[in-house]
Amino acid sequence: MNTAVCFLLLAQTTRYRDADSSSPAVFLWTLLGLVLVISFITFARRYRRCPSNRILVIYGKTNRGAAKCIHGGAAFVMPLFQAYDYLDLEPFVVPVDLKSALSAENIRVSVPTTVTAAISVEPGIMENAAVRLLGQSAQDIQNQAQDIILGQMRAVIATMRIEEINRDRQAFLGKVNEAVSGELEKIGLFLINVNIRDIEDDSGYIVALGRRAAAEAINQANIDVAEQEKMGQTGVAERQRDTRVAVAAANATAEIGEATASRDKRMQSATLDAEAVQTETEANANKAASRANQKVAEEQARNRAESAGKEADGAIRVAQELAHKKAEEARAQREQARLNAEVVVPANAERERVLIAAEAQKQQSIRVAQGEAEAVLAKMTAEAKGVQAVLDAKSEGYASLVKACTSAEQAAALLLVEKLMDVARVQAQAIQDLPIEKVVVWDGGGQGGGLANLGQRLMGALPPMHELARQVGLDLPAFLGKMGVDTPPTPAETAAAPAKAKPA
């Protein structure tokens, strides 16, 4: 179009020149206008506007490095010194079929993934895209991105365990995004999305983890169901228990009310019956009296015959006896109602009170027995502590005594001397309670016979104190006393003196 305009202007200028060849000024002005028009058209063609889905890359003499990148604006491209091209910003999908990647546990893992990326519009990253991706096809850019993503995903998987990858997908995606984004920015790309379709391993470890998790979930669900059923059955049992208790209480109250109403009804009925019988008896008595009076009047009218008077008296007596009998029966019924109200009902109440008091006495006895048992236990514990304290004190005293003595024999002698009073007391008690009613002494006539030295002989029948001490290896001092032993009589003296028996 611009060429046609130039030829049209040139033809117009030639026609003017042929029409008026004597006018060079017109030719010059026409030529100048033609130059201006051609310059404007050329300037307009080199002024490039950048659409929103592209990046305008101006390369050549830019004074800004290898290229000048513009997004969302316009720029003038100098002819001969600069050139331009465009980079598309449309996202592209990179299928990453990652297989047999080694995890931290040296288990092969397959992670089929789909990555969405595009050329970045960030300052600095656009220049990387202009340097490394300008002029390449979309397939070449996708292949470069696929190689980078595969390498980074293998590096990330090598640092993680299979259980971590399978359990925490967000953490795995975060590490993949962080690793892949940094590498893609080096060639000018921007990571938009990472979609992991599945995670598989050659050994079946992930499948086993899933089965274990499913089994645990099922077991926990069964436990929860059993717990809820237990709670439901417990709640139903409690509600039924409360219902039975409330029904029993209501029935008991109703029975008590019915018994009370029946008692009041019987009492009122008995009272009314007694009053009715009494009224009827009085009426019959009045009627009988009237009849008797009438008969007496008739008999008096019949010349007051004796026989008629006797019959009237008999009738009156019979009527009185009948009235008295009915009155007694009414009185007996009334007395029975009174006894029922005053004796039977209080007796039942007294029986209930006695039962309650007996139960209370039983509980009180149990509590008292428990308290007495605890008191006995406390007393025995205190006595045991007292005995233990006495034994401890004796042990300390004996230890001090042994330390104060120069030898073990001296300590034993001192301890034995301490117990001599107890030994003497035991010896005195041994003869104190002897049932001696009389003493028979056979006297042979010798010196010292009879009752002489009787006490000494009795004491000689007991173990001497010095002999007991000598048996344990001790010699008691002489000031403790010593019993003398009489010399037995000779056989001649015994034969010369006749035997005598003297009662005491």
Image (cartoon, rainbow, N blue to C red):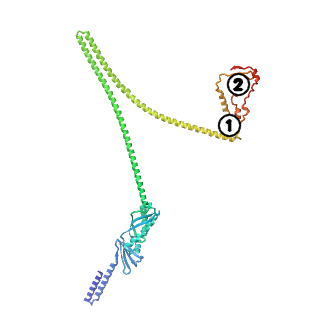
Compared to 378, does 503 lie above or below?
above
**Residue indicated by mark 1:** 415
Q: Secondary structure at mark 2?
A: helix
Instruction: Decide which of 234, 500 is in the foreground and name it.
Output: 500
Q: Quadrant of residue 97?
A: bottom left
Give the farthest residue toward the right.
Answer: 492
**Residue 123 in sight from this viewpoint:** no
**Which of marks 1 and 2 precedes in the sequence?**
1
Contact (CB < 8 A) between labels 2 and 1?
no
Q: Secondary structure at mark 1?
A: helix
Amino acid bearing label 1: Leu
Q: Quadrant of residue 285?
A: top left
Q: For the N terminus, which image quadrant?
A: bottom left
Q: Residue at x 63, y 39 (%)?
A: 393
Q: CA distance from mark 2 to mark 1?
A: 33 Å
Q: Which mark is residue 454?
A: 2
Q: Which mark is residue 251?
A: none
Rendered location of residue 396, percent (x, y): 64, 41
